[in-house]
Each structure stands twice: as C-alpha cells, then as structure tokens.
C-alpha cells in the first residue's frame, strides 16, 4: 500500500476567509461527504477525492451522522482514510465537522434536537471517525418541539467537554438563527457558523439570514452551491450514467431536470464560457462575491471536479453587466 504524501505546495493558491469574528480561517472551497463517500461507493475514488482536495488547500471536510448510504458509512470511510493517511500532526491541519438533527436510529431518541440525541449521536460519530474531537459540531435542523435552550445548552456543553471545538447551526431560518445565536452567546459559546442551502437557484438566505449572520459576526457556509450538479454543464446533453440524477439513492431526481431549467442553465453556461471559466466555477464565484460568505461547501464524485472548483478564484470578479445578465436569466 503506497503512503499518501500531501503536496508541498498545498497552501500556495487557496484563499482563506475568517469565519465571522472568530479566530478560525476556512478555505473558500470546502468539501462535503454527503454523496459519494458511503459504503455503496468506490473507496479508492473516495481517497483520491480527499487527497486532491487537501493537495489543493482544502482543509475543511464536512460530514454528518447520516451521510452514506448506509447512514454513518461516510464517517466510517473518512475515519479510515484519516487513520491510514493523515497520521501525526496532519490532524492539526484539518477542520472536520459533523452534525446531528436528521433521522439516525429508531425510537424517540434518534433524531431532532434533544440533549439525549445530540450527545449520543456525537459519541457515535467520534467512534466512526476514530477521532477524539470534531472541529465543528452542528445542530443539523431546527427542532420545533425541543426548547431552543436545551439544544443550545447541549452544543455549549459539547464545546466545554472538548468533543467539539466550535458550535454551528444548519437550516435555521433568519428568526430561528437569531434566537439560537443569542441563546448560545448568553451561555458563553459563540455560534461559529451557519450552514444554509444557497445557490443561484435557491436564494432564500438573501432575504434576511445573511444580514442576521453579518450583524452577529457569524460565518456562513452555503451547501449545494452547484444545486447538486445542475449548475454545471453536465446535464446539457442528457443525463450521464454515474451522475447523481441517475443514481437511485441520489437526492437529485430526474424530474428536477426540466426543460425550463435546462434553458436557464444553457444561458448561464454561455456567460461562463465568455468569462473563460466553467459554469461550476462561475456559480461558485457568484456566491463568493458576497464577503458575508466564508466558504462554499461543494460535493464531488471525481477528483477533477475538485480541481475544477478550486480554480473558481481565477476569475472571481463580475462586471455589473454580467451581474445584470445573470439576474435577468435567473428571473426569466
Ligand atoms: N446541512 C445540510 O442540511 C446539508 C444538506 C445537503 C448538503 N450538505 C453539505 O453540502 C455538501 C455539498 O452538497 P452537494 O453535494 O449537494 O453540493 P453541490 O456542489 O451543489 O453538488 C455536488 C455534485 O455536483 C456535481 N459536480 C460537482 N462539481 C462538478 C463539476 N466541476 N462539473 C460537473 N459536475 C460537478 C457532482 O455530481 P455527480 O455525482 O453527478 O458527478 C457532485 O457530486 C454535502 O456533501 C454536505 O456536506 C449539507
């Protein structure tokens, strides 16, 4: 078995942004392991994607208890890759996050936001990851039935215990995020970061959430910035075998790829070509133009997709004319 040796030049090109007003810098591109890292996937390919990411300065890897399939297997695979290839001080060069909130095990304690669930789930995640701590632990979605004080107290206690270094929230709407941030702040554990869905196709965060995060100096890491692959050129000539839309367990469904959507994607692709970049690069640069965004959280099924993404900063500026054209296409 050959031993992975990280590239010596890994920190030369990647840009890092401060997460809110914390001490933590995150790469502008982070890699998530929601799809493509489960036991159903090719382990060698998983390794090559992680190595390519780290070689290109991506220090942040995002997981959750339920990533797979089967649920938990992405954490198991990532734990194996870490153990065999990131020995010694390399752990100190990595920011690893996990989450709990969605369904993970049967019975009344296997999902949502109770202290019982969050504590047990993090312990399970640490075992699968073969780690003593994660860098960021998130509450994955708001729980309408558990008092926010209980959920936030648990995040606070987890940080105090050293099992996570920072606390985060995900999928909280603007008013829910404001309350969670205030409760955490009162307890003495700042909310480091919020992880919302945000892309050219899904822009709800622009209606209040980004302002709440800025006012409270909390970082923002949008997930699915490529709309699960729609904001690339991959579906313009049909649905490729092996693509997320063609997989039974993929969350992107064939029905999501409508003629109207393809028409919009085709027009966006023309602008990207004029800008000398791929549509994926333009879609990422378009989110990163807002400095309230700390990092964009991409997924990848191949190492080349990671390389494609990291080059989004080669042309990160937009003319007002380009922005206007993009707005027109998106609102058509
Ligand atoms: N907090 C939450 O509730 C939540 C929810 C969802 C996701 N997330 C996080 O966000 C991460 C990213 O989500 P996502 O995977 O939906 O992100 P995404 O970046 O929008 O989509 C990733 C998919 O797009 C395709 N792709 C990526 N780069 C490409 C390129 N250069 N050219 C062509 N196709 C490309 C690949 O699909 P193919 O497989 O088709 O090649 C890839 O798997 C997840 O892994 C997870 O960590 C969090």
Image: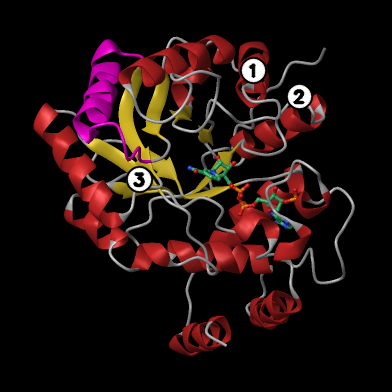
Q: Is residue 280 visible?
A: yes
Q: Which of marks 3 and 1 is nearer the N terminus?
A: 1
User: Is residue 101 depicted above or below 289 in this figure?
Assistant: above
N-terminal of the pair, mark 1 or mark 2, is: 2
**For mark 3, does the 10 Å Cα neighbourhood hold few (<14), some (14 to 19), or many (20 or more) residues?**
many
Give me the residue at 64% from left, 27% from top.
6
Q: Earlier in the sequence, mark 2 or mark 3?
A: 2
Asked if marks 2 and 3 touch (Cβ < 8 Å), the reply is: no
Q: In this view, does 123 lie to the left or right of 283?
A: left
**Residues at marks 3 and 1 touching, judged by CB atoms closer than 8 Å:** no
The answer to the question of whether label 1 and label 2 lie on touching residues, with beta carbons closer than 8 A, is yes
Can you say whether 156 is above or below 258 in the image?
Answer: above
Q: Residue 240's x, y, as percent?
A: 87, 57
- Please say whether residue 89 is visible from this viewpoint: no
Residue at 60% across, 42% down: 56
Rendering coords of residue 153 (x, y %): 21, 24
Q: Is mark 3 within 8 Å of ligand 1?
A: no
Which residue matches tag 1?
76
> Would residue 161 be counted in the magenta stretch?
yes
Above-or-below relation of 277 to 217: below
Q: What stretch of residues is rendered in magenta?
A: 142-163
Residue for badge 2: 39
Q: Quadrant of the N terminus?
A: top right
Q: Where is residue 210 in the image (x, y as percent from the top left)?
A: 30, 60
Q: Distance between the residues labelled 2 and 3?
A: 28 Å
Looking at the rendered structure, the secondary structure element under dot 1 is helix
Tell me the residue that label 3 is attached to. Answer: 194
Q: Residue furthest left?
A: 186
Q: Is mark 2 within 8 Å of ligand 1?
A: no
């Amino acid at each position: 078995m050959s031993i992975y040796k990280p590239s010596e030049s890994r920190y030369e090109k990647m840009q890092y942004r401060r997460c809110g007003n914390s001490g933590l810098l995150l790469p502008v591109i982070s890699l998530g392991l929601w799809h493509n890292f489960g036991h159903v996937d090719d382990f060698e390919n998983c390794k090559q994607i992680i190595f390519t990411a780290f070689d290109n300065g991506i220090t942040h890897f995002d997981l959750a208890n339920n990533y797979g399939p089967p649920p938990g297997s992405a954490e198991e695979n990532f734990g194996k890759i870490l153990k065999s290839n990131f020995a010694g001080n390399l752990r100190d060069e990595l920011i690893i996050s996990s989450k709990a909130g969605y369904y993970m095990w049967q019975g009344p304690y296997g999902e949502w936001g109770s202290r019982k669930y969050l504590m047990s789930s993090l312990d399970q995640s640490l075992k699968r990851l073969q780690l003593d701590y994660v860098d960021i632990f998130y509450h994955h979605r708001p729980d309408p039935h558990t008092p926010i004080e209980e959920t936030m107290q648990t995040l606070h206690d987890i940080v105090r215990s050293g099992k996570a270094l920072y606390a985060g929230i995900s999928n909280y709407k603007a008013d829910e995020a404001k309350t969670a941030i205030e409760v955490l702040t009162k307890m003495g554990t700042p909310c480091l970061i919020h992880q919302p869905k945000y892309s050219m196709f899904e822009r709800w965060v622009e209606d209040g959430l980004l302002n709440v995060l800025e006012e409270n100096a909390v970082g923002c890491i949008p997930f699915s910035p490529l709309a699960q692959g729609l904001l690339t050129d991959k579906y313009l000539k049909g649905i490729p075998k092996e693509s997320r839309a063609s997989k039974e367990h993929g969350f992107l469904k064939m029905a999501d790829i409508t003629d109207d959507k393809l028409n919009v994607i085709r027009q966006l692709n023309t602008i990207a070509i004029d800008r000398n970049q791929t549509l994926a690069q333009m879609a990422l640069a378009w989110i990163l133009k807002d400095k309230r965004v700390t990092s964009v959280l991409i997924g990848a099924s191949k190492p080349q997709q990671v390389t494609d993404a990291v080059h989004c900063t080669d042309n990160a500026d937009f003319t007002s004319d380009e922005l206007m054209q993009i707005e027109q296409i998106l609102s058509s």
